[in-house]
Amino acid sequence: MTQLFVPPYRTLATLPEFLALHASRTPDYPFLWAKSGGEYHAMTWREVADKVAACAAGLTAKGVVPGDRVMLVSENRPEWLIADFGIMAAGAITVPTYTTNTVADHRHILADSTPKVVIASSAALAARVAEAITRENQPLPLITMAPFESEQHSVAEVSSWEALLSSGVPAPQPPRSRGDVACMIYTSGTGGTPKGVMLTHENLIANCKSCWDHWNNLLPANGSDARFLSFLPLSHSYEHTCGQSFPVTTGAQIFYAEGVDKLTQNMREARPMLMTAVPRLYDMMRVKILTSVAKQPAWRRAQFALALKLGEKRQTDPAGLTPHEARRDRLLDSQVRQEIGARFGGALEGMISGGAPLNPAIGRFFTALGVRILQGYGQTESAPVISANRVPGAKIHTVGPVFSCVAVRIAEDGEILAKGSSVMKGYWNRPEETARAIDADGWLHTGDVGYLDDDGHLVITDRKKDIIVNSGGDNISPQRVEGLLTLAPEIGQAMVMGDRRPHLVALLVPAAAFAAEFAAKNGKPDDIAWLVNDTDFIKAMRAAVTRVNVTLSPVEQIRKFALSAEAFTVDNDMMTPTMKIRRHVIKERYGDRLEALYS
């Protein structure tokens, strides 16, 4: 029997020390996998450690000293981790930014964080950040992983990634403290201007230890055979900790996905055991599965429906399964669930859901089909996980037991407060906002409302600032109503409002598949911009809303709605990169239309 490897979370001070440990322990074992020539190829722990040392030496040669900031703009790839750990090994602070950032977004982060060097991957990303550098009149060295011509931009110098790795002489780095800032991750901006969250090595290591405490029973004993698939942007704290830092501390392998369009293929190739994802991804996967099943023969559709029915009954009322149902349910594992599991690689032990609330109905759907979803909760300011479900004992309508690195208490107004070793050092250059977020006793005010159930599982009810209080004084959770609306096949996205109003109204984005099907059946143009003004189409959407309203209490029901042909996306700034809607942006753009619904 292989002896269980327990990462030395209490003895190592920084994340690069964990990488060095595994490079010494399993130097020739595969570590980082990326696609090349249509196939996955691995870099070993030794190769990665050598490149990290070279990166740190190169940055030091460029004048980077401990405490300096280095901005990193890249899609998920091995070089992302190498740059991140190289920056930390040099004693500097990684400032990751989203690949979807606009020039204006980059300008804000450049001005706020004042980095010493900028590292970018592709020529397109380098051009955007170079334009921001030029407009900020802040000439900086720009290191690019792809050829880039900079004649039109006022950057101090442009050098290649290869040149950086060969420009310094690797040397032992002075010891670092667990209290040193490792990275500065900017909030996603759901409520306004992004703020730089300073996370120390202590914050990240403490959160990784809690991940281990929660999920080590889902991983192989030696750790090195564990496989993760990195898909969410590494510039977000959720993926940065759970999809990168945690597997590094355990000695696991990381596969990099090519993108959402190839995610299913990549899961089959990588066969991940653990993977992070956001609820929007589950929504899309559910639609794909249902669309595929709808094309199957009647007997296959009946099998699928029975697998769903019995699987959900096993979750909600396991004692209620009759002996015959229990036998049939086990048989459906090979007839239905095994095939569904193959879509996720066939080795998946759990998908960790975070970044936004998971609709319990979506969670029950996948769990009934044998795909284990473990919902968690946190925020950038807590590095990021505060609580998460684990096995056994997962409860899909909750965000699970509190992590060992934090304590949680519920304030008198229902707000969730957290305190512990994973809570941020503070916001960069914002002492007043830090003091508002973390009180004098060290409690982080999350802005989320919830409660702890009898089993110690945390239940989130809503964002404190998002709760709608109607004119009758009723408190309404918009996220709950939006979640039920988007379960309807006709509705792709939804945002509801009604603060200080007698009832709720909604802005709805029709589901593209439904719109195309409606157009074909009714002889209408296959053009959502045309359909949203069509009387028959509006009638069909109203029928969907009426159907959902039956499941809602009177104060939650949608009385009127407006249709938008434009989806909420990252590109139009109406969604964050982790697929949360930006309410303030949507209200700015559609406020007049929504207000008119009350006329």
Image (cartoon, helix red, strand yellow):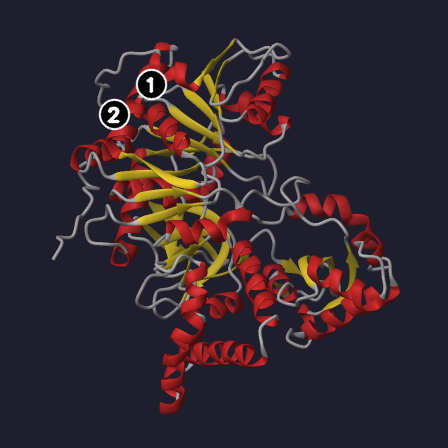
Q: How many marks?
A: 2
> Which of 127 and 400 lies nearest the eye of the viewer?
127
Question: Can residue 422 be seen from the camera position used here?
Answer: no
Side of 547 relative to 70 (left or right): right
* Residue ID for mark 1: 66
Above or below 278: residue 199? above
Residue 400: x and y in percent read 38, 61
> Which of 275 and 438 lies nearest the eye of the viewer?
275
SS state under label 1: loop
Side of 244 relative to 470 (left or right): left
Residue 511: x and y in percent read 69, 59
* Residue in the image at 26% along x and 32% along y: 14
Residue at the farthest front position: 37
Question: Can residue 193 be seen from the camera position used here?
Answer: yes
> Which of 588 and 218 lies nearest the eye of the viewer?
218
Q: Tag 2: residue type?
A: Arg
Q: Tag 1: residue type?
A: Pro
Asked if the residue at tag 1 contacts the one at tag 2, i.e. Cβ–Cβ closer than 8 Å, the answer is: yes
* Residue in the image at 55% along x and 35% along y: 194
* Residue ID for mark 2: 176
Quarter of the image with the N terminus is bottom left
Above or below 537: residue 205? above
Badge 2 or badge 1: first in the primary sequence: 1
* Residue in the image at 38% along x and 10% along y: 63
Side of 560 relative to 252 (left or right): right
Above or below 105: residue 271? below
